[in-house]
Amino acid sequence: MRGTEAGGTLTEMSDSIRADKWLWAVRFFKTRALAGEVLGDGKVRRNGHILKRSSSIQPGDELEIPFVEGPGVREILVKEIIEKRVGAPVAQACYEDRTKPEVFEALKAWQIAKQEAAKGRPTKKDRRAIDQIKESWEWDA
């Protein structure tokens, strides 16, 4: 496995890493503690099974990661293992995003609805539009 040092040079690394560390290193979460919290809540899945903080991630694993804010789940294929947090271009090379476009559209609609809600009390027409958007989401417990 290839990895990246702080200076940007490639080095040999192990074939697996803790789930919380990898999710933080490839920039899905701002802090490792936040990644651990999401994993601890059982919201991240690997190949259909709930993933724990200390579970190891290997190349070829398919992960389902919830968005930090908003509805939907990202579908990710792990391509490479890194241990240290790196720049976004290097981090994006370590996984393949297989998320469907409909998920991003639902997230965008949620963000717009959230912005509209921040403007003050919605009118009856606005409330109906918000309710219609919420009904189209699939909420996971």
Image: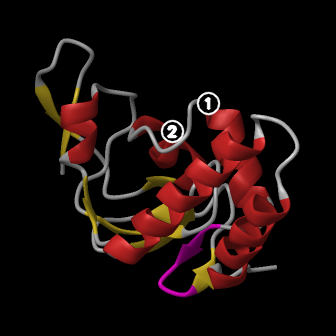
Magenta residues span 44-48
Say if the magenta span includes residue 47. yes
Label 1: which secondary element: loop
Q: How far across and how far down the image is residue 81, in percent?
A: 31, 50
Residue 102 visible in this rendered orientation of the protein: yes
Rate crowding at label 2 as few (under 14), some (14 to 19) or many (20 or more) other CA atoms within 10 Å: many
State the mark number for residue 31: 1
In the image: residue 3, left or right of residue 65? left
Residue at image x 64%, y 45%? 35
Residue 9 lies, with reference to residue 118, above or below; the image says above
Q: Look at the magenta stretch and give its main secondary structure.
A: loop
Say if the magenta span includes residue 127. no
Q: Amino acid at mark 2?
A: Trp
Residue at image x 62%, y 67%? 44
Query: Quadrant of residue 75 in the image?
Result: bottom left
Q: Which residue is mark 2?
A: 24
Image quadrant containing the C terminus: bottom right
Question: Could you tell which of marks 2 and 1 lies nearer the N-terminus?
Answer: 2
Label 2: which secondary element: helix
Marks 2 & 1, CB-CB < 8 Å contact? yes
- Indicate how the structure is coloured in the image: secondary structure
Q: How far across and how far down the image is residue 133, in percent?
A: 65, 73
